[in-house]
Structure formats: structure tokens, C-alpha cells
Amino acid sequence: MPEIPVLSPGEYQAKLLSLPRPGADKVMAFYEHRVGAICKDVRLMLLPLDDHLLHRGDGVFESLKWVGRKLYQLDAHLERMKKSTASISLAPPCSWDELREISVAVARAGDAENGMLRILLGRGPGGFGIDPFESPGASLYVAAYHFTPKPESFFEKGVTAFKTATPAKQSWLAKIKSVNYLPNVLMKMEAVEKGYDYPFCYDDHGFLAEGATENVALVDHDGALVVPEFTHSLPGTTLLRAIDLIKNEAPVSFRGVSEADVYGAREVLILGTTGDCIPVVRYEGKPIHDVRPGPVARRLRELLQRDLAENGVGF
């Protein structure tokens, strides 16, 4: 093995900036609180190795989209982030009002009609131990990147789903949108390997929890929207907004949902930021009802898209 060189700061920086950067075409702009500025050169989008966000998973995040230069549910995402940070005794390095302004500014700097925003709050750099008090201050990173809509075939023909081998998260952890997403990654990996579009995980009692990055709901044979209780799942901003939008058109109930309920449903719905409402037409290879997207899926997608157009935060 050749001797590893020790470079000067200038040499190291030059070497770093010359390296290929996978995904460089996807990122439009980013912000790092220590610098206090927005940058558009993705080669400089770096994370300190000793930030506990990285090596301990000690942090939380939110992802939201904008369409037509309107951020959807920005305040709902920030409210959920407040709850997540409170549960792990973490506070942002600025006020929540400032964080909101920063988020809008980064989206604006992205200079695109449509996009995604990722907000990350971490314990901050300061050491490689587990003690959170190693970090003198929290870290904040905000990135704007390209939004890739789901293919229209997902809505016109529906998608497939299956029961993943990865169990639902522990109840207390499931309600925190932390950066500990290894179970979610394993769920997605299994879906790709088995040729399904979406994985569903279940708790120890056999009740449906959630997807890898989405919530799941059913429509029963009476036309009611049935939502799995949030015992082992994250209350999704899209799901909660969808419930609010349709509550005057269809009854809504929260209860434990078994696999038998999934097989017997009139509709199975996937609700999340990037897809709004996506219909599942086959589960574990077996048909859901008549194997066609149903009216509730179409109506919820319509309501969510209209809500974004009417109530999104413009910039």
C-alpha cells in the first residue's frame, strides 16, 4: 500500500473540490448555520464528521415539497419538528421563526418551480463520544433539491405492496422523526429485492404500522376511511391534512388494522409528501377489491393538490 500523503489545508481543499460528487445535479442550494449563508456549489455541502447527527444519529429532520413555488405544509412540518426536538431535549441554534425564514430563503435560492426541502437539526459537532454535552451547540442544515414526481401510472393503474420482514419501530421512537432511518432503509431494500413498490411494517401484535416513508390507510366496505392507530407509526403531515380535508365527505376512524383488514379493504391508500395519495391494487400479489384505483384515492389526491395551490407558502 502506498504511503498516505499528509496535505496542507489548501492542498486538501483542492483535492476535495476536484473529486466526483454523486448527486450533484440534484441539489440546488443549501444552508449551514455555522456559516450563516446559502451556497449553490454542492461540492461544499459537507457535514463535520464529529457532528453527533452523523455518527450517533442524534438529530431530527423534516422533508417537504414545493410545487409552483409554493411550499406545502411548511408550518405543519415545523410543528412536528418542534415535537421531535422536545422529545430528545434538542433546541435549534436559532429561533423557530428564523428557521422558517431560512427554509423559505433556501427554497427561493433553489430557483425552480418545483422542488424538495430537507431540514436537519443535529446535536452538533464536538466529539466522537455518546455524551450529548460534548456538543456546545446544535447544528442546522437545510438543502433544496429536485422533486421527482411519482409516475402517473402509480395513480392510473395503482401500485403493489407487501409485508416487510422489518418490524415496526418501538412506540416511543416511531413518533420521533429522527435521522435513525436504518429500519426504513431495510424496508425499501427488501421491496426492491422482491419487486414490490411499497413495504408495510407491522407491530408485535400484528397490527399495521406504516410504510418506509409513508402512512397507510384503508377504505372499508362502508366507505369509511380507516387509519391505523399511531401506536407504532409517525403521524404524517399528509395523512393528517388529508383527514381534515375529507372529514366532511366520509367518516374517519382510528383503530388497529390487521392483514385481514388489508386483504378485505375496498381501497388501500399510501399517503406521503412526494405522492400525496397513491392507491394500492395488489398486496402480497393478491388483488385489493377490483384491482383498480378507487374513488377515495382520487378524491384525496385532488383535495391535497388543491390545498397546496390554495394554501402553500409562496416565495
Image: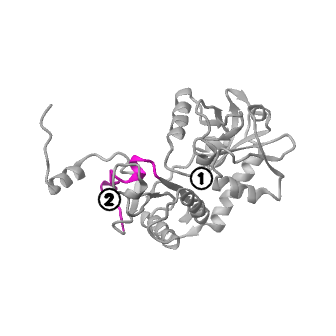
Q: Is residue 314 above or below residue 127?
A: below
Classify mark 2: residues with Cα within 10 Å, few (<14), some (14-19) or many (20+): few
In the image, what residue occupies the spot 15% across and 31% down? 1
Q: Is residue 227 above or below residue 34?
A: above
Residue 98 located left or right of residue 82? left
Which numbered disc covers residue 151? none
Q: Nearer the viewer, residue 268 or 261?
A: 261
Which numbered disc covers residue 273? 1
- Can you give x and y, in whole percent of width and height, for residue 298 in the image? 73, 49
Which residue is at the far right? 222
Q: What residue span does the magenta drawing correspond to? A: 37-58
Numbered label tally: 2
Mark 2 residue type: Asp
- Can you give x and y, in whole percent of width and height, for residue 199 in the image? 61, 35
- Badge 2 is on which residue? 41
Which tag, 2 or 1, sits closer to the chain's start? 2
Q: Which corner quadrant of the image does residue 262 belong to?
A: top right
Q: Is residue 247 above or below residue 282?
A: below
Residue 252 located left or right of residue 208? right
Q: For numbered disc 1, what is the local secondary structure? A: loop
Mark 1 residue type: Thr
